[in-house]
Amino acid sequence: MTSRANTALDSALEPTTNNDVSSYRLFQLISPSLPIGGFTYSQGLEWAVEAGWVKNRASMEEWLANMLFSSVATLELPIIDRLYRAIQTCDTATIHDLCERLFSSRETKELRAEEKQRGLALNTLLGRLDIRVDGIELDDYLPNQLLGLCVAAVHWQINVNELKKGYLWSWAENLVMAGVKLVPLGQTDGQLALIHLSDQFSKALEMEQQTEDWMIGSFTPSVSIASSLHETQYTRLFRS
């Protein structure tokens, strides 16, 4: 074996020196199970199935696409983008405004409770892990999951665009798996739904980039109706 080959082999066997773990921290944040138990919420999908509005993969994909383009792309993603920048600059006034805008856009009791519960759970976890950004105290703001996600992302140096992509995936995976249980659907249908929904993520991200401050909001009346009626649904697997 030549000396050049030996050198190449030795190099290949050396441990990597890449210490960038931001991608792995993003995977932690977007898990439906960790850190805030997103798997326990269906955001009105449970009632939609009960009412027959969602009864197969096609109707579930239509339901979720409506949520994607009428809420996630115009509310959550723009707020993530702005919260991230406000945290970086310690713009506490803007953070307050964005948290209030997010909470006021949750139109039902269950959706507001979900936002608060997820936010409190994430705030508690970040505190125990000593994840923080100087000048930003989570307890000073209305508890919500997006603020905690952005604080963790800034702390772990997760790129904001990657954070938004991760949020999209987490949202879609959580609700598709809820649909798999509720409709019910097989695992193959669940995977197809994720493929078809994620194919539309680039369009959602483009919409987010075109959303001006005054345009931030959500318009999903069917989801609001389903969420309201879910409060009194007789048998329920999910908290929303």
Image: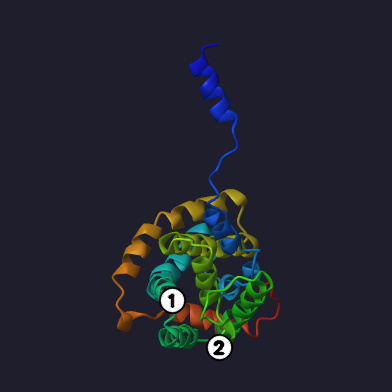
Outermost residue, front direction? 3
**Image quadrant where residue 238 sits:** bottom right
- 187 on left or right of 59: right
Q: Residue 44's x, y, as percent?
A: 56, 76
Three-letter amino acid code at the position of disc 2: Asp
Q: Mark 2 or mark 1, which is nearer the start of the sequence?
A: 1
SS of the residue at dot 2? helix
> In the displayed structure, would residue 54 be above or below residue 94?
above
Residue at left offset 66%, top offset 69%: 129
User: In the image shown, does 112 or 116 lie closer to the viewer?
Assistant: 116
How packed mark 1 is, by other alpha carbons closer than 10 Å (few <14, some 14-19, many 20 or more), is many
Where's the C terminus, which quadrant? Answer: bottom right
Looking at the rendered structure, which numbered label has been put on residue 83? 1
SS of the residue at dot 1? helix
- 128 on left or right of 196: right
User: In the image shown, does 229 or 26 lie closer to the viewer?
Assistant: 26
> In the displayed structure, would residue 103 be above or below residue 149?
below
Where's the N terminus, which quadrant? Answer: top right
The answer to whether residue 18 is visible is yes
The residues tagged by marks 1 and 2 sit, at their Cα atoms, a distance apart of 14 Å
User: In the image shown, does 52 or 181 lie closer to the viewer?
Assistant: 181
Outermost residue, top direction? 1
> In the displayed structure, would residue 205 be above or below residue 94?
above
Q: Residue 160's x, y, as percent?
A: 43, 64
Q: Residue 218's x, y, as percent?
A: 41, 79
User: In the image shown, does 12 or 123 lie closer to the viewer?
Assistant: 12
Residue at left offset 56%, top offset 85%: 112
Looking at the rendered structure, which numbered label has been put on residue 204? none
Three-letter amino acid code at the position of disc 1: Leu
Judging by the rendered image, the residue that carries numbered circle 2 is 140
